[in-house]
Image (cartoon, grey):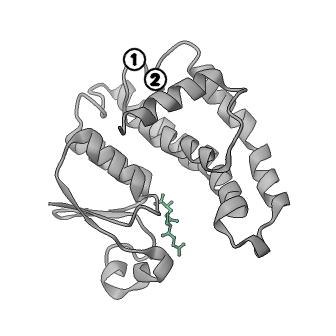
Amino acid sequence: MITLYGNDRSRATRNVWMLEELGVEYERNMVDHTKGEAKKDDFLKINPGAKVPALTDGDVVMFESLAINLYLAMTYGKGGLWPDDAAGQAACGQWTMFSATEVEPHTVGALIELIFKPEAVRDEAVAQACLAKLPPVLNVLETTLSDRDYLGGNSFTAADLNVACVVNSLNMIGFDFTPYPKMTAWVKACVARQG
Ligand SMILES: N[C@@H](CCC(=O)N[C@@H](CS)C(=O)NCC(=O)O)C(=O)O
């Protein structure tokens, strides 16, 4: 049985999205990182870094949300969310790394300063600096999606899920998506799959 650790106020939601796409059975352990539960000894055996999400699947023990999604796709989504061909698989790797290194540091940086931190200690200048990094990154998505419906080509794969879950988080701060019409249509279509 697969167990996903982390509650719905964490990045575990992106793993729930993947698990639901794949239609595999799983159970949740709602470790609440905001209450220090990720620092307890039992959880530290799963992620010594004391962060959620994490996942166990038999002998497989994993952390890092986007890598968990790649594992799930390549294990349970062959020929679908995990393409059969090397080029499609490499696209999943490429876009996942793009999401983790080029997009998420700036989205999370802005979210922390605009909504996650207590108001008294928020830093508007840091938030704006993060937001200022986004246009060239989002333009990569806009350009890519100008001649295709999905990042890897004609069908929805782990590449789309792993980027869309990060880009969509910008809706939490009322981000202006109008300069990116193709990307906006794509992210809406991806998110709508969650029902
Ligand atoms: N890169 C990691 C980030 C994990 C992360 O920062 N998780 C947050 C919740 S979404 C957490 O557990 N924070 C606890 C802490 O930083 O002490 C991933 O994508 O899984």
Asked whether, in this view, residue 43 is left or right of residue 91, the answer is left
Residue type at mark 1: give it. Asn
In the image, is 112 to the left or to the right of 123?
left
**Residue beneath label 2, please?**
150
Q: Amino acid at mark 2?
A: Tyr
Describe the element under mark 1 as helix, strand or loop: loop
Q: Residue at x 61, y 50 (%)?
A: 172
Percent coordinates x, y for residue 102 in the rendering: 63, 44
The Cα atoms of the two marked residues, 1 and 2, are separated by 6 Å
Determine whether label 1 and label 2 are within 8 Å by CB: yes
Residue 85 horizontal side relative to residue 139, left or right: left
The answer to whether residue 42 shows anywhere in this view is yes
Nearest the eye: 72 or 88: 72
Location of residue 119 in the rendering, given as x and y in whole percent from the top left corner = 74, 70
Q: Residue at x 49, y 15 (%)?
A: 148
Q: Quadrant of residue 141?
A: top right
Q: Quick one: quadrant of the N terminus?
A: bottom left
Q: In the drawing, does residue 51 fall left or right of residue 70?
A: right
Toward which corner of the image does residue 99 lie, by quadrant? top right
Residue 25 position (above or below residue 139): below
Question: Where's the C terminus, which quadrant?
Answer: top left
Q: Which mark is residue 154?
A: 1
